[in-house]
DNA sequence: ATGAAAGCGCTAACAC
DNA sequence: GTGTTAGCGCTTTCAT
């Protein structure tokens, strides 16, 4: 296998045409519309191209002319490690990539860490549309995306009027978890949640922060929990909520530790992600708490590892989410009305939830 | 938050300039070289732009002019699910994405499933270079990439003269595993390996297929094993090698089953990836074989789950691999000589390897 | 500090 | 089946 020359693009479509003594159109057709010229001529063109080291039409020039970049951008503001280590995020990425593959278009990951307020990358991306995945509602990159005159689909959050969106039925999902917990009899609960804004707060979350969370999904989940538990007679102000900025299993563990240290009487820990729940599970083990006898723990997402661990959680179809976003975007055409696609979720009751030990057991127990 | 108009790009840099009664240069400068015009004029330009709904310079046109796409392509020929479900591959992807982020360039995933022989996507990608990850040496997409007049870096495989490459010291790695097994005293071994070519062969692997494998890495690993074991007096023709086309834990399990059914006297199973090894581990459990007392199992990669499982394996720095590839590509400039970067690996002896039960134990055992 | 001129490399009408 | 004509929207010397 020998290397082609790596010198600066020497031949262009025009020079090839000149060399051959034909028009540029003909050369262009040789590549793009084989049926528009005689096979013989086409053969000659391609052969000469090879001889001259002409690599075929320049993709950028073609894009300019055709007004199609052949790629969709993916905005994923969280720092990448956050995304690449969350199986749920990877599922979305895979689904989106699958949809792109089907359509034969590339998937362009936009470099946008939370640190760099540098929105230029969004402007520089040669894409026909954007998928935005789970960013806070005040994200400057998102603003920049919405400025671009191309269709956009948001996955999960935020919810923005007039912008296509695909996400799970979050409301129903979290309510199903909450009802499960309530009906088991739990009244002393605690909540572990993911970051609520772009600022770090690895601590308990006061009410106003819960209500002003910049991540719509987390905000909605907390609100739904509040509603459900208050309906069951639990005063939400008494429910401890602990937040973590990072999203690894260890963070779930430390959050659980912080919460249980301060509220040892809690009988159920509701986590807004499986990752956090897996950490909580580990922490429970470390403290000698039996799950679910001593402590009920629930997650959210339904990732494979959670299933293996028997976690009670709500499963959401992440792969489908990504696929749906891709299809929605690629089929956007000149659609007038915008679309919101809501995907179903499903409560999976595992082996980590059970009724709380009764008050008697607590007071007179072993 | 209100939606910008989604109508076809109405304003261009030229029309903006006309509207303002200034030259296009000035408008361009307002965006790209703020120091080249008076703050006052710049303000006017930007404001008018907003009023006219001009979204800023078109990225594709800019790319054509500057001859910089601001993105690197990633060719990942395997079907995406293969890649997105292998933690080692994800590590590479993350590392590469990190490097791109640092440099402020996008990462363009090229749609190229093995099914679609459609190489056009490679031609259509507006990128400044390519990273190719672990493809067979006869991959047509790879050919297409090499045709393009942009720098290319190959990760892992194949090895091609004159093309930059970054990969682990595979040779040393696999030899360290082999020596470990040999020195423990194993002589009855079996091997589980990943796909050796683009054709499916979920079965035992005859010698000629081993030697002609189109995946360089697998070929090299098998060759190194052969060498090492023959030096220890094991005739390689007697060593069963089972191949799997897919690469999930279940595939490792079924491969182990196939091998152990036919060769029950095997005392050590060498797997060319941790995923396969995890499957083998599961299968061993299913058969009531104790690991490592009854059966030694080793992996390759050092993924997190393997570490948790205590697997004896060779760890390779996947994140670094991706980062190195990105840096190499982005720093390529007009370098003359090509580079090969070899990353160190490390044998991690876990709890899945031990000396074999002696012949006596085999024959007169319980 | 601003403008005029000259393409970057290609494709799409439309004519022949 | 092949060529002619016109840009796509922008940046960049080089003048002024």
Image (spheres, coloured by chain):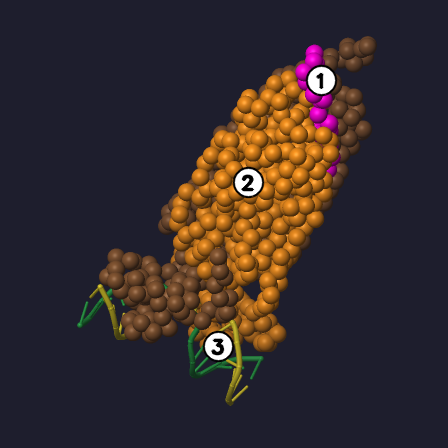
Chain colours: A brown, B orange, C green, D yellow
Which residue, given by chain and number where applicable, does mark 2 sit on? B84
User: To which quarter of the image does residue A259 belong?
Assistant: top right
- Residue B171 drawn above or below residue A61: above
**Residue closer to the observer: B109 or A355:** B109
Contact (CB < 8 A) between labels 1 and 3? no
Indicate which disc, 1 or 3, sits on the residue closer to the N terminus: 3
Could you say whether the residue bearing mark 1 is in a helix, strand or loop? helix
A62 vs A4, nearest the viewer: A4
| Residue B355, horizontal then vertical, whole percent | 73, 27
- Residue B42 placement, left or right of B293: left
Counting every numbered tag in the picture gives 3
Residue at numbered disc 1: B361
Pointer 1 local density, CA inside 10 Å: few below 14, some 14–19, many at least 20: few
Q: Characterize the magenta stretch by its predominant secondary structure.
A: loop
Residue at x 61%, y 27% (from the top left corner): B280
Q: Which residue is mark 3?
A: B22
Residue A282 rendering spot, x and y as whole percentages = 73, 28
Looking at the image, tell me whether mark 3 or mark 2 is earlier in sequence order: 3
Asked if labels 1 and 3 share a chain, the reply is: yes
User: Magenta residues?
Assistant: B348-366
Q: Is residue A335 above or below residue B364?
A: below
Residue B354 is a magenta residue: yes
| Quadrant in which the C terminus of chain B appears | top right
């Amino acid at each position: 296998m020998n290397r082609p020359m790596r010198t600066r693009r020497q031949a262009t479509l025009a020079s090839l045409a000149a060399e051959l003594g034909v028009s540029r159109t003909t050369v262009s057709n040789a590549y793009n519309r084989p049926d528009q010229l005689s096979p013989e001529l086409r053969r000659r063109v391609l052969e000469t191209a090879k001889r001259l080291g002409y690599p075929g039409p320049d993709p950028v020039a073609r894009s300019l002319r055709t007004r199609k970049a052949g790629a969709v951008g993916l905005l994923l503001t969280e720092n990448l490690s956050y995304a690449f280590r969350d199986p749920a995020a990877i599922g979305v990425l895979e689904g989106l990539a699958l949809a792109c593959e089907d359509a034969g278009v590339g998937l362009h990951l936009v470099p946008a860490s939370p640190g760099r307020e540098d929105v230029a990358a969004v402007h520089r991306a040669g894409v026909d549309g954007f998928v935005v995945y789970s960013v806070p509602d005040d994200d400057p990159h998102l603003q920049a995306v919405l400025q671009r005159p191309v269709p956009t689909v948001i996955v999960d959050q935020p919810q923005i009027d007039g912008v296509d969106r695909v996400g799970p039925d979050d409301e129903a999902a979290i309510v199903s978890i909450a009802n499960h917990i309530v009906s088991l009899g739990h009244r002393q609960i605690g909540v572990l949640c993911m970051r609520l804004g772009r600022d770090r707060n690895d601590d308990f979350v006061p009410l106003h922060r819960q209500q002003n969370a910049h991540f719509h999904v987390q905000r909605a989940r907390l609100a739904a929990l509040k509603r459900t538990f208050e309906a069951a007679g639990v005063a939400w102000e008494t429910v401890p909520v602990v937040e973590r900025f990072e999203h690894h299993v260890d963070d779930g563990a430390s959050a659980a530790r912080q919460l249980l240290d301060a509220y040892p009487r809690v009988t159920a820990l509701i986590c807004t992600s499986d990752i956090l729940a897996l950490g909580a599970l580990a922490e429970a083990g470390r403290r000698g708490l039996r799950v679910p006898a001593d402590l009920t723990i629930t997650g959210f997402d339904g990732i494979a590892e959670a299933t293996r661990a028997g976690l009670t959680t709500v499963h959401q179809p992440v792969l489908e989410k990504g696929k749906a976003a891709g299809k929605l975007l690629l089929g956007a055409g000149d659609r007038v009305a915008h679309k919101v696609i809501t995907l179903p979720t499903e409560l999976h009751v595992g082996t980590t939830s059970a009724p709380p030990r009764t008050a008697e057991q607590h007071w007179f127990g072993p």
